[in-house]
Image (tube, grey):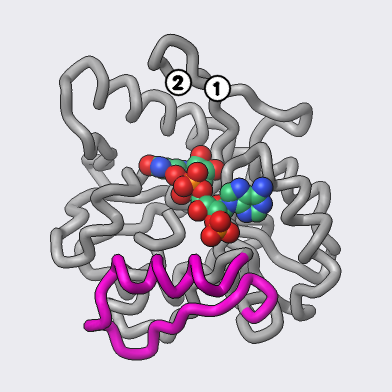
């Protein structure tokens, strides 16, 4: 997901840092994206939190606690964190949503973030492989919610620049539970219909 987000944002002209725990892994990920995007740099996760005020959290949900523990005190005041994580358990190839006590990954993360850091949640229903093929249109909608209209707007200022994606604002973080259920639904659609990039479109909007 991180590689795809970085590719799409930089293709849209947003200066982007692609982070990893190990710089060499970020460099390797950048090589997989290709060097055609200006303004895209491979760095360490520490560099990301030191230099960015819009930071995407794209790690397995099981590692969120560790990642927050390591970096939450270092995020710059006024930063908006964008959560794309989904707590899923895979059982016989099927994905099940396993929410934390707060009800969703996004609400869990909000509960563990300093108040001066904003939170938006999105890209929960976009398939990573398609996201990574930045030359292909996404041709879908993606839902976004946030802990305030300002957090959502800050994330949208970057994401609205992805031309083939329509962002659909669904309000506060209480919507995240539904979005995270929809991730499991998209995986089910992929499996049952033997496709790889099922995603959503809202009609009548
Ligand atoms: N895959 C999808 O289609 C999709 C769609 C929607 C949402 N999501 C959600 O998006 C998140 C990322 O998905 P993904 O498929 O990109 O996951 P992934 O490939 O399993 O992991 C992404 C990166 O997280 C870092 N990471 C792994 N364990 C870590 C740890 N213990 N501490 C810190 N960093 C760690 C690794 O980067 P480094 O080793 O380079 O640091 C890894 O490359 C997940 O929560 C997933 O549920 C996925």
Label located before the other in sequence (2 or 1)? 1
Please state the extent of the stretch shown in magenta in the rendering. 22-47
The answer to whether residue 24 is above or below residue 165 is: below
Left/right placement of residue 19 relative to residue 74 reads: left
- CA distance for labels 2 and 1: 6 Å
Residue 44 placement (x, y as % from top left): 61, 75
Residue positioned most to the front:
24
Left/right placement of residue 154 relative to residue 201 reads: right
Query: Pointers 2 and 1 in contact (CB under 8 A)?
Result: yes
The answer to whether residue 24 is above or below residue 1 is: below
- Find residue 157 and report its image quarter: bottom left
Q: Is residue 35 magenta?
A: yes
User: Which residue position is annotated with label 2?
Assistant: 95
The answer to whether residue 179 is above or below residue 126 is: above
The answer to whether residue 121 is above or below residue 160 is: above
User: Which mark, residue 89?
Assistant: 1
Q: Residue at x 26, y 20 (%)?
A: 191
Residue 180 placement (x, y as % from top left): 51, 34
Q: Residue at x 36, y 58 (%)?
A: 167
Q: Classify mark 1: helix, strand or loop.
A: strand
Q: Residue at x 37, y 24 (%)?
A: 185
Residue 205 placement (x, y as % from top left): 27, 48
Left/right placement of residue 147 relative to residue 144 reads: right
Q: Classify mark 2: helix, strand or loop.
A: strand
């Amino acid at each position: 997901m991180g590689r795809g987000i970085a590719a799409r944002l930089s293709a849209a002209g947003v200066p982007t840092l692609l982070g990893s725990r190990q710089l060499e892994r970020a460099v390797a990920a950048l090589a997989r994206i290709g060097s055609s995007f200006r303004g895209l740099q491979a760095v360490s996760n520490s560099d990301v939190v030191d230099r960015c005020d819009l930071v995407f959290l794209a790690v397995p949900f099981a590692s969120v606690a560790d990642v927050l523990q390591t970096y939450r005190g270092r995020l710059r005041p006024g930063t908006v964190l964008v959560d794309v994580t989904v707590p899923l358990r895979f059982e016989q190839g099927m994905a099940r949503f396993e929410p934390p006590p707060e009800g969703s990954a996004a609400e869990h993360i909000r509960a563990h973030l300093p108040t001066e850091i904003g939170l938006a949640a999105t890209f929960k229903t976009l398939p990573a492989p398609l996201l990574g093929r930045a030359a292909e249109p996404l041709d879908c909608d993606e839902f976004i919610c946030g802990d305030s209209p300002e957090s959502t707007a800050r994330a949208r200022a970057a994401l609205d620049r992805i031309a083939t994606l329509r962002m659909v604002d669904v309000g506060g973080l209480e919507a995240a539970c539904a979005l995270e259920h929809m991730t499991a639904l998209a995986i089910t659609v992929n499996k049952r219909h033997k496709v790889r990039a099922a995603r959503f479109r809202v009609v009548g909007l």
